[in-house]
Image: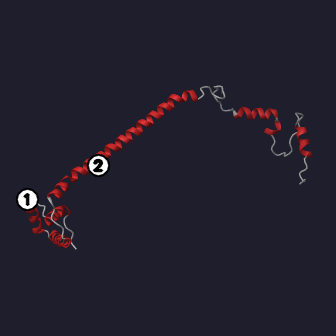
Amino acid sequence: MTVPCRDWEPLLLGRVSGELDAAEERRLDLHLSGCAACRAELSALGEALALAELPPVSEGERAVLAGAERSALAEWKRRLRRRRSLAAGAAALAVAAAAIAFAVSPGLVRRTPLVEVPAVAWQPPDLDEAWSEAAIADPSAAGDEASPEPAESSSGDDTLYAELEEIDLDAP
């Protein structure tokens, strides 16, 4: 099956319906002399039109068809303008709502913070100094790791160990 030339299909339809002028008829005849696919398409279109038995196109129909492109374009432009105006209205409404919210918000928002935080720059702790202070406070912590027993001190650690011994770990 051969496919007719896409650019020539409107002229083929015009020939079948009898709407071509003399110049278009000559151009189509030149093309049909060298294109078998378009000749076959013209024949098939003629047979289909004969089966449909359509009346010839009237002058009123030709006038409507001639203005169809312009009227469709005009309707499309009208709809486009309507959409643009609706979008512009929606944008104006959004701007107005934002302006109202901005104007009303200073009265609704507290200007003073709930908690006042002093402005002090944070400094990371000196870990070497903290380690050496811990070693001075408890000399056994920095020293001998081989002895698993804690060193006894008189700084109140005895009471801590005494409390731990009172806890019964076997109780349910």
x%, y% of residue 23? 8, 59
Kind of residue at badge 2: Trp
Alpha carbon separation for disc pair 1 and 2: 32 Å
For the point 9% across and 62% down, which residue is it? 25
x%, y% of residue 19? 13, 61
135 w.r.t. 34: above or below = above
For the point 70% across and 34% down, which residue is it? 127
Label 2: few (<14), some or many (≥20) within 10 Å?
Answer: few
Residue pointed to by mark 2: 76
Q: Nearer the viewer, residue 162 or 27?
A: 27
Q: How are the residues colored?
A: secondary structure
* Lower sequence index among marks 1 and 2: 1
x%, y% of residue 142? 79, 38
80 w.r.t. 20: above or below = above
Kind of residue at badge 1: Ala
User: In the drawing, does residue 94 fall left or right of residue 43?
Assistant: right
Label 1: few (<14), some or many (≥20) within 10 Å?
Answer: few
20 w.r.t. 47: above or below = above
For the point 22% across and 50% down, which residue is it? 70
How many numbered marks appear?
2
Residue pointed to by mark 1: 23
x%, y% of residue 66? 18, 54
Q: Quadrant of residue 138?
A: top right
Q: Secondary structure at mark 1?
A: helix
Q: Nearer the viewer, residue 70 or 53?
A: 53
Q: Are marks 1 and 2 in contact (CB under 8 Å)?
A: no
> Is label 1 or label 2 in front?
2
